[in-house]
């Protein structure tokens, strides 16, 4: 996520830290490099120009130059201005407290709009009964795709009759939602390869009938600043309320994320961070700025951990550990909790250690392979690895689709982990948070 621009910023700050002291000359050189980094990231030129101007004014101020840690102070200036150009405060979605809330999703074809409808629905599911409405009658199988996604996310689905036009589908969907007691409907409208009058006229008609609380433009993050003009045109005709960036987990340069707010005045509300339905997050400018500058995003990491970790189960695992009863059944539980947090790479992206792991292979397949091996064991075998003789190991390897060397490697690693556990078991206080055995993860000091 934003790896290229993050690498550039890390190199710039590393170069500044090598200086004995900060001066107007080396700060100016750093600012020039930042300007090039932003332009290479496909950030709108006017946004870059304004950004550099305000950074230069503050970074060359007396307070920064005389600071005890001038480089860190300079980084803070850059961080704060990045937050400003992305919109400052995060913006929550606007929903009615009573009656049915309507969200109209718009955008060009290929932006990931249909998948994003399901992701947003899953995000709202805990607080709302959500109905997905398939109003794209032009793209083949668009309705079928939305129906499948609705099933995966356990959301309602409505698409009208085969010959219904998009406007008719939306009108009927409102009545259906009211009859079935839905609290929110998300309309998947048709997209085009480019803006055209029939598309816009249709969207204007849908807006008039449904009176949406939110009109959200879905954009592919990799589109860069080129998407700015498209957003402006949709806004001119529909008065959109915000933007969702899809494919934010890709090696995007960052142009769209850093350009949209300043050039259109519209906030980025959410980002899609992967292919799965639950790979969807609110857009927090300060957290994204932290990731860009290589500082990680500890707040998002803790929130994901809170959602994924069963604290009661974690407490039981910690107790088992202290009593020397931690086995592969418990290890399997830990793997499942880690997987709930998302891909290993997405977890690493949120941590400030990302740069230290740059040359290491982060592969979720290793975690999947480990889980498969343990699942191929019987509960008795997981509870007592000493009974795993040669024939059992061959059976486990065949059952998990791995090699016997993989099974042996896992058992060796588990044995080494248990040896470490024996050493540290003498000091239980050092294990306080090993398994997340705390009731409120927000209290963890990082």
Image: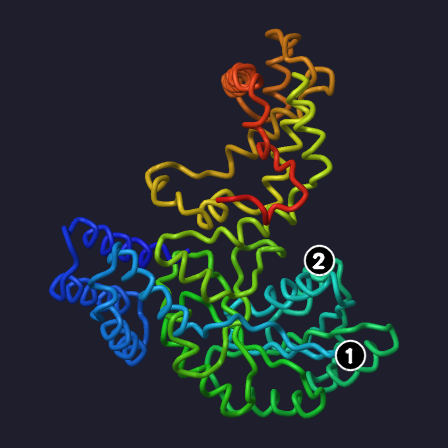
| Residue receiving disc 1 | 100
Mark 2–mark 1 CB contact (< 8 Å): no
Q: Secondary structure at mark 2?
A: helix
Q: Is residue 440 depicted above or below 241 in this figure? A: above
> In x, y percent, where is residue 272?
53, 61
Seen from this angle, which residue lies furthest right? 179
Decide which of tag 2 and tag 1 comes sooner along the chain: 1
Splitting the image into 4 quarters, where does residue 186 fall? bottom right
Q: Residue at x 24, y 58 (%)?
A: 70
Q: Quadrant of the N terminus?
A: bottom left
> Image check: 312 left or right of 60?
right
> Image check: 157 left or right of 222?
right
Seen from this angle, which residue lies furthest left? 25
Q: Is residue 251 depicted above or below 396 in this figure? A: below
| Residue receiving disc 2 | 153
> In x, y percent, where is residue 371?
61, 30
Q: Residue at x 67, y 87 (%)?
A: 206
Q: Secondary structure at mark 1?
A: loop
Residue nearer the viewer, 72 or 107: 72
Please name which of the two marks, 2 or 1, marks the residue nearer to the observer: 1
How is the rendered protein coloured? rainbow
Label 2, label 1: how far apart the Cα atoms are: 20 Å
> In x, y percent, where is residue 158?
77, 72
């Amino acid at each position: 996520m934003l790896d290229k621009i993050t690498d550039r910023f890390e190199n710039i700050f590393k170069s500044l830290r090598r200086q004995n002291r900060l001066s107007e000359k080396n700060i100016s050189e750093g600012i020039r490099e930042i300007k090039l980094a932003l332009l290479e990231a496909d950030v709108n030129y006017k946004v870059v120009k304004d950004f550099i101007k305000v950074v230069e004014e503050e970074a060359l101020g007396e307070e920064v130059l005389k600071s005890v840690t001038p480089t860190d102070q300079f980084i803070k200036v850059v961080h704060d201005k990045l937050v400003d150009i992305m919109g400052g405060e995060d913006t929550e979605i606007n929903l009615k407290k009573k009656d049915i809330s309507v969200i109209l999703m718009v955008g060009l074809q290929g932006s990931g709009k249909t998948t994003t409808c399901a992701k947003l629905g899953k995000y709202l599911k805990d607080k709302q009964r959500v109905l997905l409405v398939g109003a794209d009658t032009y793209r083949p199988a668009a309705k079928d795709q939305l129906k499948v996604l609705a099933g995966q996310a356990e959301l309602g689905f409505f698409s009208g009759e085969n010959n219904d036009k998009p406007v008719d589908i939306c009108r009927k969907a409102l009545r259906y939602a009211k009859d079935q007691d839905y609290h929110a409907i998300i309309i998947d409208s048709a997209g085009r390869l480019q803006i055209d009058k029939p598309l816009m006229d249709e969207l204007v008609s849908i807006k008039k009938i449904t009176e949406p609380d939110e009109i959200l433009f879905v954009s592919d993050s990799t589109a860069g600043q080129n998407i700015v003009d498209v957003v402006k045109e949709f806004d001119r005709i529909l008065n959109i309320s915000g933007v969702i960036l899809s494919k934010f987990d890709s090696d995007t340069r960052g142009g769209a994320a850093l350009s949209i707010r300043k050039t259109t005045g519209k906030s980025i509300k959410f980002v899609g961070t992967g292919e799965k339905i639950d790979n969807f997050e609110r857009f927090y400018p300060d957290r994204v700025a932290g990731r860009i500058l290589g500082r990680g995003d500890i707040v998002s990491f803790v929130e994901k951990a809170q959602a994924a970790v069963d604290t009661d189960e974690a407490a039981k695992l910690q107790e088992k550990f202290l009593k020397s009863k931690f086995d592969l059944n418990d290890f399997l539980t830990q793997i499942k909790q880690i997987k709930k947090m998302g891909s290993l790479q997405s977890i690493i992206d949120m941590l400030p250690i990302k740069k230290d792991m740059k040359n290491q292979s982060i592969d979720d397949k290793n975690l999947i392979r480990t889980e498969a091996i343990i699942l191929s064991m019987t509960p008795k075998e997981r509870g007592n690895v000493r009974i795993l003789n040669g024939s059992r190991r061959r059976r486990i390897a065949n059952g998990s689709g791995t090699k016997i060397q993989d099974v042996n490697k896992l058992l060796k690693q588990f044995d080494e982990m248990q040896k470490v556990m024996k050493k540290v078991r003498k000091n239980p206080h050092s294990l306080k948070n090993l398994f997340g055995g705390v009731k409120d993860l927000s209290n963890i000091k990082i």
